[in-house]
Image: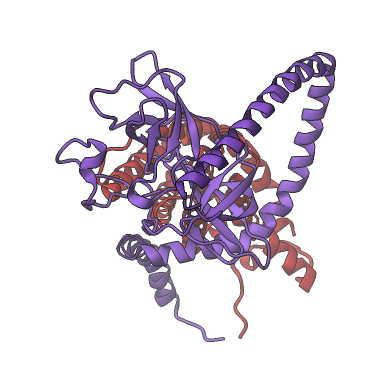
Chain colours: A red, B purple
Amino acid sequence: MPRISRSEHLPGIRPRPTIWRRLDAAARRALPAAFTALLVLLLCAPFDIPQQQAMLPGVTMASVFFWSVFRPASMPAPIVFLIGMLYDLLSFSPPGLEAVTLLLVHAVGIGMRHSLARQGFVVVWFSYLLVAFVAIVLDFALLCAFTLRLLPPQPALFELALSAGVYPLLSALFTWAHRGIADPSRA
Amino acid sequence: MFSLSIQLRQALGKLTLPLLLALACLVMLVGQADRRLAESARTGVADLLAPFYSFLAQPIDRVRAIGREAHSLIGVAEENERLRAENQRLRRWYDVAMALAAENATLKSNLNWMPEPAPSFVTARAVADASGVYARSVLLFVPEGQTLTKGMVALDAAGLVGRITEVGSRSARVMLINDMTSHVPVMLEASHAPAIVAGDNSAAPRLMDYPEDVRPVEGERVVTSGAANAFPAGLPVGTVHYLPSGQPVLEPYARLDHVGILRLFDYGLSAITPPEAPGRVILRNHADEGEFGTVPGRPAQIGRG
């Protein structure tokens, strides 16, 4: 007996799932993760923008957090792990560090999703700020522990400010995508 | 396709996240324990992406070149005038240099001077600024058929840029002299005093460990010293500059913020240690620690890029 996916339990009339329709739905489902990976690649690309890589933690954490809260199916834990590893290998950070951080952000997002998904933007933003703060402090502490010296805290603060600032922009973009091109039920 | 019971599937789904977290922690520990493994993984990814980045760099370079051209067209007349004057001055200097070169050759032949072998070099372009917030490095694209080796010295048109610390088959990473872990043994040209240029991730690395009785002079030229066999002697590094706080720093000749084409010289030097993650600390006592007037008890961090 073929397994019936959850959306097919819902009542209503829908077109037959042809191969193209399924491909379309899969592409829409994969869009958030693919977009995040592409952002990581582009932020490590040679654009010569000053402090280009300082955007990386903010962008990846915002993306992982948003999709973990609003559609975890598009941002499963293995994908989060892979994005973290890609980040670590492309930037100069110790391998595994960002994977741990992103997985923790993902876990918090999943845990808080039932209470957060119903809230307005400002509440979500503030919760994200809290999560980002803890994550960046953890990052900083681990980096200090690995290097056995106290690193200057300014870059970490700068990263935090950037991630706070970039979240509303990404959130607007993701909300639009969530209802539009990244919505599998529109396939 | 095998089907699992709903309970089992839910249990597995709950287990994924803790398992992945444990895996990530394991990766972190392994990466710390075996730096070579982490390095090879990193160069593998960089190798894969180097052609993509170099493809991406071309249109950006073109746009930037157009911008530069437009900018230079504006002031072309006065630029012309300035160049004419400079050319005249340089012509005079050329004569002086030729006379000095001839004199130098005569003196060397009188002294039975043993000439140093001319180093071989290759040229490569930096395709990506691989700097994080805690590290300063660039990624080089290595064309087919050229081999780079770890420890090659990188110079741009004006001066020392850094050293190769990681080599892949299509890419290589150059750690810049303003990286936080970079310590370059240098010599102040006027006083011949040894010093260390220590990167601190800012544009101007610090100048430290010069002898107590020597005060670096503002604008003094700084060149590499052959100490610790890490760099060949006499490469131009930069000039001395004093910050308002009184701390002497080095203003590099090389443009470290926009690294483009690099010349990579193979001097066959030996004192190269493998690179590690940022802020790496190796407690290792160098035999020539005292030579730099280092503070006792502080590890001499010489010979590391």
Foreground of the two, A126 or B191: B191
Left or right, B56 with respect to A108, comes to right
Residue B147 position by quadrant: bottom right
Residue B137 location (% of width, % of height): 50, 45
Residue A19 location (% of width, % of height): 77, 73
Foreground of the two, B25 or A17: B25
Foreground of the two, A74 or B66: B66
Residue A36 location (% of width, % of height): 59, 51
Residue B270 location (% of width, % of height): 39, 59
Question: In this view, which residue lies farthest toward the front?
Answer: B110
Quadrant occupied by the N terminus of chain A: bottom right
Which residue is at a point 55% across and 36% down the rendered structure image? B256
Above or below, comparing residue A158 to residue B105 in the picture: above
Which residue is at a point 48% across and 35% down the rendered structure image? B237
Residue B159 position by quadrant: top right
Foreground of the two, B75 or B290: B290
* Number of numbered markers: 0
Q: Is residue A169 visible?
A: yes
Above or below, comparing residue B100 to residue B280 in the picture: above
Above or below, comparing residue B95 to residue A26 in the picture: above
Q: Is residue A182 visible?
A: no
Quadrant occupied by the C terminus of chain A: bottom right
Which residue is at a point 75% across and 47% down the rendered structure image? B58
